[in-house]
Image: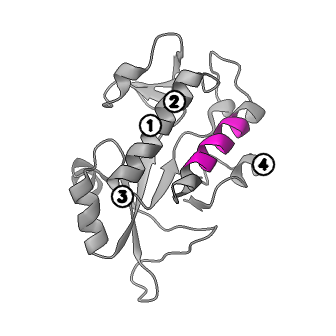
Amino acid sequence: MKNKILQGLGVLSISLLITGCDFKTPNNYDNDYTIEVSLDTTSYSQIESYHFDGKTVVCEFSPTTYEDYLEDDYKFNQFIIGNEVNYESNKYWVDIRTQLNYDIQTDRINKAYSLGCDKLFFSNVDIFDYINDFGINENTTYDFLYDLINESNSYGMSVGASENDLINTYDISNLFDFTTY
């Protein structure tokens, strides 16, 4: 129930950052809280409120999927939308090799920076582990994520991903600044 209430407020979770450049633990006076929020449903004023409370704000989005309920869904076209993600309804894999998808994702990074996000969290980065319409493999995914992470870093935002997404992907996991459980 608590998670449903937090999600209604645009909060996905309060996460521990496990590896990489930061190690944050709640209730430790030497460290900040870290809160993960949805990039699409969180406002500038909400992020400022978290900052006022001393929280580091990690904004989450999926650079490898299309979701028809997100505010930027109109930017995608039918040619880059593929199979439904088998573990989530209303979410579809996209062709990450296209300039259109890259442009959409860099717009999201710019939005995150404008909103005041401290860090980014990319979900569904394990696209190559699933059947997709585009023949995307680990190398294609690596190249795509490498470019997006560099773009994010140019704004001063570090980027993380879920350890669950990176279990069998040592090369890709080395791209990220941090991972979470």
Q: Which residue is mark 4?
A: 171
Q: Earlier in the sequence, mark 1 or mark 4?
A: 1
Residue depicted at 43% across the width and 62% down the height: 118
Q: Which residue is mark 2?
A: 103
SS class of the residue under badge 4?
A: helix
Q: Hey, what amino acid is under mark 3? A: Gly
- Packing grade of label 2 (10 A; few <14, some 14-19, many >=20) is few
Q: Quadrant of residue 95?
A: top right
- Packing grade of label 1 (10 A; few <14, some 14-19, many >=20) is few
Q: Are marks 2 and 1 in contact (CB under 8 Å)?
A: yes
Work out whether residue 92 can be spotted.
yes
Question: Which-is-in-front pick, marks 4 and 2?
Answer: 2
Q: Is residue 113 magenta?
A: no
- Packing grade of label 4 (10 A; few <14, some 14-19, many >=20) is few
Q: CA distance from mark 2 to mark 3?
A: 20 Å
SS class of the residue under badge 2?
A: helix
Q: Which residue is mark 3?
A: 116
As drawn, is 150 to the left or to the right of 120? right
Would you place residue 17 above or below residue 161 in this image?
A: below
**Can you give x and y, in whole percent of width and height, for residue 40 in the image?**
33, 41
Q: Are marks 4 and 2 in contact (CB under 8 Å)?
A: no
Q: Which residue is mark 1?
A: 107
Q: CA distance from mark 4 to mark 2?
A: 24 Å
